[in-house]
Image (spheres, rainbow, N blue to C red):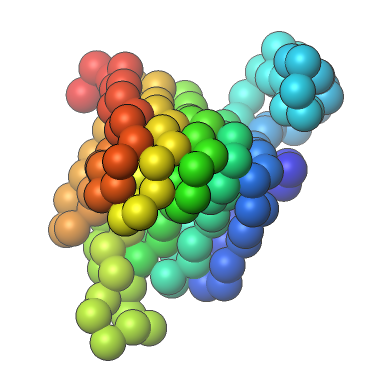
Amino acid sequence: ALVGGDVQIEGGYIKASAGRIEIASVGENSVVSLISPGQGWQLGYENVSTYRDITISNDAQVEASGKDGAIHLQGRKINLNTGGQLVNLTIDRESTGPITLNGSESVYLSGGGSKELIPRDAGVVTSVQPEAVGDSGDLIINTPQLVLENGGFLDVGILGSGQGGDLIVNASE
């Protein structure tokens, strides 16, 4: 888990194989709790009154592929730009967990990266890879405003033999 005020991940790679990655950006005087829903740990936000911003950019990638892998982002404005990606892939015979984005104001995905020969757009991917037989996790977005522009994307796909997850978007704009 990574918890702070404004959280910025610029370039680089964060990976938790078969684990849970939780990134939260909380305001002043906020208290985040640690809860166990039965398996593993996750953060509780019941005592958070305000959130701050999360930015993942410059080809940064956050990945939790593998058995029960999950990614959870909790903030005010969640921005993935210039190639920033969240990735959760089913790569074997194990199913993955969800990718959840909770932006109290907005979730924004825009623009391509610059480090690769073929620029990588900013986006979120949860899919069953070729030769895999497990199920992919859901992609869940809760925000008042969802913006995808300049190549920003959401991908819930199946390239192997498993079941794809659901794309669940709760947004008014």
Residue closest to the eye, 29 or 131: 131
Residue name at image x 40 percent, y 41 percent: 133
Q: Quadrant of the C terminus?
A: top left
Give the quadrant of the N terminus: top right
- In the image shown, does 150 or 118 lie closer to the viewer? 118
The residue sitting at 29% across, 69% down in the picture is 120
| Spot occupied by residue 43 in the image (x, y as percentages of width and height) | 73, 26
Please identify the quarter of the rendering in which residue 15 is found. bottom right
Whether residue 36 sits left or right of residue 115 in the image: it is: right
Q: Determine whether, in the image, residue 79 is placed left or right of residue 40.
A: left
Pick the residue in front: 37 or 11. Answer: 37
Count of numbered badges drawn on the protein: 0
Q: Is residue 37 above or below residue 60?
A: above
**Residue 142 image offset from top left, x and y in percent:** 40, 22
- Farthest residue, direction bottom: 117
Q: In the depicted view, which residue is nearer to us: 15 or 153?
A: 15
Q: Residue at x 67, y 43 (%)?
A: 19
In this rendering, is residue 115 above or below 58? below
Up the image or down, 170 lies above or below 98; here it is above
Picture coordinates of residue 114 (x, y %)? Answer: 32, 80
**Residue 167 in view:** yes
**Residue at the extreme top:** 46
